[in-house]
């Protein structure tokens, strides 16, 4: 008989529920015993599962969810983007901690609004709740999180990006990519960016931000050669269809405030906390 507790989906489910419980405390640290009780697990088992997937203990992780954590990140791990790195990422190999192969759609392909494109989709488990993953034979083209927005709205949102495409439900085709994207596999994850030329420039700049670090919308605008287009950059960041892999959650306001997030601020806090925790745990190892 298979041990369900050894499966990535099981761990993702535990972590997603735990992050939700922790976030609802509003910044008040929750004791391990109370967290485990909420998840109907023994404290020891929950601690093992959580620490394995996040890299730190539940107690330590909660420190990364404080309201001023984004400001601390900006002060300690602010990445000034290099214009040379932000230009022309297309076709390059591995980027940072994720095995990403990035390819962008041509302007002509984008103008056709997905016509002639077959996009396969499926719901996948993730540490941040249910994730809708979409992809073509060239790679993942969409990841949306439904924990805050709901499954129906998430589906409608991503489908609206490419209204003339043909959509086919096929979670099996996307599963290995999804597992690797969320840290439970070692396959290369190809990403196929479908957007307007300006959006592609912004998304390529986002790909240069290391995990556990942040930058500002102003820095992104400067790096791509449009220093006055901060608002347009913010819009392009918000229109990024491949959440997590193209890390729009790493973009903050220059004041250190989170700003908006297309899939809900609780999800953005969880993404930033997860990355910062794992980065610090790796650095301390």
Image: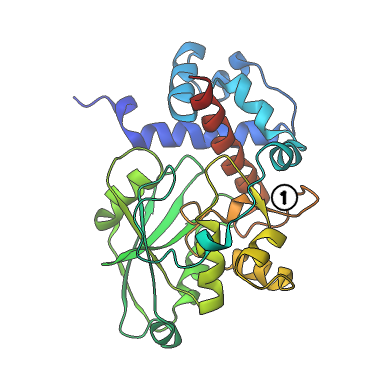
Query: Front-most of 142 and 275?
Result: 275
Q: How is the image coloured?
A: rainbow
Residue at point 53%, 53% (across, down): 247
Query: Front-most of 187 and 75?
Result: 75
Q: Kindly indicate the quadrant of the structure image that contains residue 69.
A: top right
Q: Residue most toward the right?
A: 255
The answer to whether residue 161 is seen in the rendering is yes
- In the rendered view, does 229 fall on the left or right side of 179? right
**Image position of 231 with respect to 257: above or below:** below
Q: Secondary structure at mark 1?
A: loop
- Horizontal and vertical percent position of residue 103: 37, 67
Residue at point 60%, 16% (across, down): 32
What residue sits right under mark 1 in the picture?
258
Crowd rating for badge 1 (residues with CA inside 10 Å; few <14, some 14–19, many 20+) = many
Query: Front-most of 85 and 54?
Result: 85
- Horizontal and vertical percent position of residue 15: 49, 32
């Amino acid at each position: 008989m298979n041990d369900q507790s050894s499966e990535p989906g099981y761990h993702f489910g535990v972590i997603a529920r735990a992050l939700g419980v922790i976030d609802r405390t509003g910044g008040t640290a929750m004791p391990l015993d109370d967290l485990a009780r909420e998840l109907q697990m023994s404290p020891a088992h929950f601690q093992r599962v959580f620490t394995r997937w996040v890299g730190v203990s539940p107690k330590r992780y909660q420190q990364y969810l404080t309201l001023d954590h984004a400001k601390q990140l900006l002060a300690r791990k602010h990445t000034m983007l290099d214009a040379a790195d932000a230009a022309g990422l297309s076709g390059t190999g591995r980027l940072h901690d994720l095995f990403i192969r990035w390819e962008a759609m041509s302007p002509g392909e984008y103008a056709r609004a997905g016509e002639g494109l077959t996009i396969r989709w499926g719901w996948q488990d993730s540490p941040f709740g249910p994730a809708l993953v979409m992809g073509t034979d060239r790679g993942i083209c969409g990841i949306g999180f439904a924990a805050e927005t709901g499954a129906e709205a998430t589906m409608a949102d991503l489908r609206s990006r490419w209204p003339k495409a043909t959509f086919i439900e096929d979670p099996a085709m996307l599963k290995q990519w999804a597992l690797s994207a969320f840290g439970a596999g070692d396959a290369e994850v190809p990403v196929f960016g479908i957007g307007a030329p300006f959006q592609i420039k912004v998304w390529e700049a986002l790909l240069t931000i290391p995990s556990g670090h942040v930058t500002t919308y102003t820095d992104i605008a400067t790096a791509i050669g449009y220093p006055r287009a901060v608002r347009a950059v913010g819009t392009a960041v918000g229109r990024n269809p491949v959440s997590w892999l193209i890390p729009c959650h790493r973009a903050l306001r220059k004041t250190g405030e989170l700003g908006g997030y297309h899939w809900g601020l609780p999800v953005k806090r969880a993404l930033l906390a997860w990355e910062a925790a794992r980065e610090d745990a790796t650095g301390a190892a």
